[in-house]
């Protein structure tokens, strides 16, 4: 058994049995070891943005880490943008990066790079394996870190640590990370006192991380109903359970002015595994912080703490009311079914009406899907995943990973065209693994969000340079051809009727299907 | 005039008039400023790997920098792999990365990341603009650094430095980089003495950087002819002028054993803007260094020095012979034209026979193109560009940038399928800009190079995991569909006759064309 064998066994022993991969020469011993362990499922991505984005989607839905397998610094580099998103989502990932043999590094061979420098900004935990004997302690520590922080544990695997045999005496285990303490009783009392003092409608409970689902969400719903706190969601949620019978979050709007207005009445903001709300971008003469300067912000629980327990402790302190915790949603009444020429709005209405029970919606539609969220508060129960870090190109990989984690649930990727093109290669993995994903491309042939931002900086007439940087026409992208090229069945809709036909067909059948929805 | 206007003017004033771009919100003021300057040509890439790879191709052929425009840390991250390649090629690039306004960074908005940590490993020079007044000095320093080092000068542009107005007094210029000295006379004498002492056939002149073209190559050719030194090329050349009438380099082979054999007789190795030859990867029980342990290695000139002048000084010292400097090539005689089923070898033979005068060949064919190099020593003069850093996914972008730099020359991308898929989005830029690029996909539906490496680690029968990580079939990729989806005309060949038909058609017409050569 060489180091690579021990690495595989260490992963499997701790329940990590999915490896999203794009290996290279320095990882061949690891590949050979994986090949000797059919219990590990290796899933190839044609580029590393697919690998890391899929690991994110898997981790969000499975609530345990997958492993990645990336080839040295450049392989990691290609996967960094989606690791950035996963870092913001606090998704558990064991991120394995192969490297040259340790003794080869001083020769600065062409593929040599500073892997640590690339990895640090996206890693909650980072370790370079020191030799074959360090493999088992390292993989134990990495899985523990990824699971408990939770977050991204990057493990650098030098080729000679993979091909070498550990000595018989074994290495010392790494220090275990301390468990995060439950919120102190004093803190819970302080939050409760602030809620009581502020009064109904003046307190926001901002739910992030694991607070937007399961028992944590249920307790938060009861707090809202019994104590008049507002349930707020982050601008971009990592995974929220939504739909009929569930407490509904009011997500903070993306545009700064709308966000300021939404938080105007909040005197006390209680953070539950969420970050203080700030503007996504800075704009001249607009504030960075979104709460009022005199708003008091308290942190009830941080990521990695027992979120549901913290909320229960708060409920104990405030007293449990009689409600069921299902706040009445701000759901719009279902609009009349649209017809004729397809529009963003029509897609939202039609999809909301058809959403299957327990669907997983991966939303990277950006400008095109705002209405969909509003329309789906009371539809069939579903999970809703977003781009949490603003690095575009997450949607197709995220849906891929979610479908691996939940093979019996329908995954729907609501995908803007501009961002979808970043990691369009992920369609091939969906085809190869026969994943049950319906991808809806909202094809407006533009970086529409940026056109809006240009207006915001005072430019309304585009010259040649702006037009060429902010549109995707000339030539127009043919998504049906692209999907077919990657082995995914696809069709185009320009009318509501055709879109509904295709949607119904895609929902009935199993396996990947792509709809190019021209808007 | 805001900071962004000064940035554009600074670039244009120093001859940087091409900007490969994929902008985002934090760069909107820069986009607006670019839009006010039609003298700048902005070229959109659908993902940042296309942007940076195209800047590499442009810089290698134009011998002056293009600018990039990347959106914050994740936008840079997506472009890092091809910047890694460009760093190894020492290509001049002014790499502009937008960031949040400086005052917004402490709020850690979702898109915030440690840009410096991402950028350092690929940058020869790195600077964060401190405010609107620092824009002009910074852009002057960046262009100077990119051009003279030469290499990658990364300039981080905070949004508030772009939208702010510089104060009237202006900022102090940055310190200029010192010019690299010409090689000392003593060094030249030392190299000459070593060459004389070693005798004919025992000295290798390893040409890298700018030494593989123009007058430097001509002088090197005369040295080979008159003084019996062997002209060696690096395993992966950044840009070599090749073909009839030019001195031919013997490239060091990629496989370690072959490389050791090729360098076995070398007692003295003289580096001319080249790095000491080392194995691309380490393998158990094989050395990292490729020269004999007792080989004496001398550096005549480093990148950024006057390479041709250094070689002329050496020639003065050794004495100029009567030769023309055109070493007799090791060119194989032209083989008989192949027919029937298409093979790698047939593609090499057919393409070598048809190569147009002054073609630019971008070779990322990896396992598939070794023969092509051997066959083209005596064909029409052409430039030959390779992947210099081992980060795959350079070919399509490199060809794109080369075609922008040299609109009147035919560009031929010899592209392996696995690596081509990384940055296949670059085809769209070729279509949009109507670039004269013929892309030949060597479609073997596998990571063939890795299958070879698996054999090298002793695995000959693949199980399910290895098979799924090292093959690209099931489903088979349809390159004709992919190219069509991106707006590039394409066709498939499975026979020599069909390939030749398609090649002749592609060479006759202008604009992008892709041949899926099934092998």
Image (tube, coloured by chain):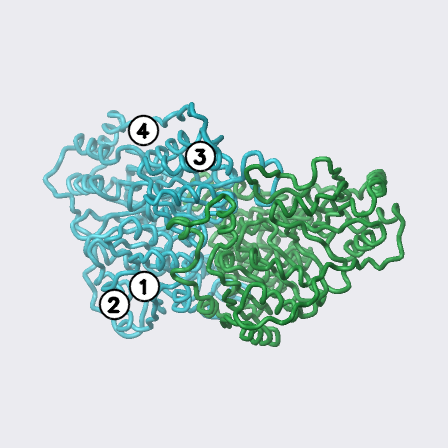
Chain colours: A green, B cyan
Q: Are marks 4 and 2 on the same chain?
A: yes
The dot on residue B513 is 1
Label 4: few (<14), some or many (≥20) within 10 Å? few
The dot on residue B276 is none
Which residue position holds label 4? B180
SS for tag 3?
helix
Residue B178, quarter of the rendered image: top left
Q: Are marks 4 and 3 in contact (CB under 8 Å)?
A: no
Q: Position of residue A159 (x, y in %)?
A: 51, 49
Protein chain holding label 2? B
Residue B430 is left or right of residue A87, and the answer is left
Q: Are marks 4 and 3 on the same chain?
A: yes
Q: Residue at x 24, y 61 (%)?
A: B352
Which residue position holds label 2? B505
Residue B306 is left or right of residue A458, and the answer is left
Task: Measure how far apart labels 1 and 3 are at the Cα level.
Answer: 41 Å
Label 2: few (<14), some or many (≥20) within 10 Å? few
Q: Residue at x 34, y 44 (%)?
A: B40
Q: Are marks 2 and 1 in contact (CB under 8 Å)?
A: yes
Protein chain holding label 4? B
In this rendering, does residue A19 appear at all? no
Label 3: few (<14), some or many (≥20) within 10 Å? many
Task: Measure how far apart labels 4 and 2 are at the Cα level.
Answer: 48 Å
Task: Measure how far apart labels 2 and 3 are at the Cα level.
Answer: 48 Å
Task: Measure how far apart labels 2 and 1 are at the Cα level.
Answer: 9 Å
In this rendering, does residue A365 appear at all? yes
User: Which of marks 3 and 4 precedes in the sequence?
Assistant: 3
- In front here: A114 or A394? A394
Which residue position holds label 3? B3
User: Which of marks 3 and 2 precedes in the sequence?
Assistant: 3
Protein chain holding label 3? B
Protein chain holding label 1? B
């Amino acid at each position: 058994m060489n180091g690579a064998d021990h690495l595989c066994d260490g992963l499997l022993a701790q329940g990590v049995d999915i490896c999203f991969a794009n290996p290279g020469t320095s990882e061949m011993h690891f590949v050979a070891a994986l090949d000797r362990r059919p219990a590990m499922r290796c899933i190839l991505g044609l580029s590393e943005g697919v690998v890391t984005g899929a690991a994110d989607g898997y981790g969000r839905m499975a609530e345990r880490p997958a492993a990645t397998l990336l080839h040295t610094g450049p392989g990691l580099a290609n996967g960094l943008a989606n690791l950035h998103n996963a870092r913001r989502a606090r998704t558990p990932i064991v991120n394995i990066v192969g490297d040259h043999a340790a003794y080869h590094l001083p020769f600065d061979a062409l593929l040599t790079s500073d892997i640590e420098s690339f990895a640090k900004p996206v890693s909650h935990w980072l370790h370079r394996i020191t030799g074959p004997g360090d493999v088992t302690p390292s993989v134990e520590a990495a899985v523990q870190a990824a699971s408990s922080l939770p977050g991204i544990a990057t493990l650098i695997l030098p080729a000679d640590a993979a091909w070498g045999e550990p000595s018989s005496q074994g290495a010392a285990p790494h220090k275990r990370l301390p468990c995060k303490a439950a919120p102190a009783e004093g803190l819970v009392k302080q939050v409760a006192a602030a809620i009581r003092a502020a009064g109904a409608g003046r307190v926001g409970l901002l739910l992030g991380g694991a607070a937007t689902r399961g028992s944590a969400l249920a307790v938060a719903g009861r707090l809202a109903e019994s104590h008049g706190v507002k349930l707020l969601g982050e601008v971009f949620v990592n995974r929220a359970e939504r739909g009929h019978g569930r407490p509904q979050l009011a997500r903070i709007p993306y545009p700064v002015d709308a966000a300021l207005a939404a938080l105007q009445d909040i005197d006390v903001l209680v953070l539950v595994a969420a970050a203080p709300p700030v503007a996504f971008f800075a704009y001249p003469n607009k504030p960075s912080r979104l709460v009022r300067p005199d708003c008091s912000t308290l942190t009830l629980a941080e990521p990695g703490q027992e979120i549901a327990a913290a909320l229960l402790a708060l409920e104990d302190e405030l007293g449990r009311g009689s409600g069921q915790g299902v706040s009445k949603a701000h759901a719009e009444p279902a609009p009349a079914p649209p017809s004729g020429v397809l529009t963003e709005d029509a897609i939202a209405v039609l999809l909301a009406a058809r959403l299957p029970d327990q669907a997983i919606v991966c939303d990277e539609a950006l400008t095109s899907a705002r209405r969909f969220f509003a329309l789906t508060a009371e539809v069939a129960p579903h999970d809703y995943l977003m781009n949490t870090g603003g690095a575009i190109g997450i949607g197709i990989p995220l849906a891929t990973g979610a479908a691996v984690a939940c093979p019996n649930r329908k995954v729907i990727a609501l995908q803007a065209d501009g961002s979808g093109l970043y990691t369009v290669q992920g369609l091939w993995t969906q085809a190869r693994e026969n994943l049950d994903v319906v991808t809806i491309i909202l094809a407006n042939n533009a970086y529409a969000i940026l056109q809006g931002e240009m207006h915001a900086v005072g430019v309304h007439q585009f010259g040649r340079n702006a037009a060429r940087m902010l549109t995707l026409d000339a030539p127009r992208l043919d998504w049906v051809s692209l999907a077919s090229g990657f082995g995914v069945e696809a069709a185009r809709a320009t009318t509501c009727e055709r879109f509904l036909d295709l949607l119904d067909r895609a929902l009935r059948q199993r396996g990947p299907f792509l709809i190019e929805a021209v808007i």
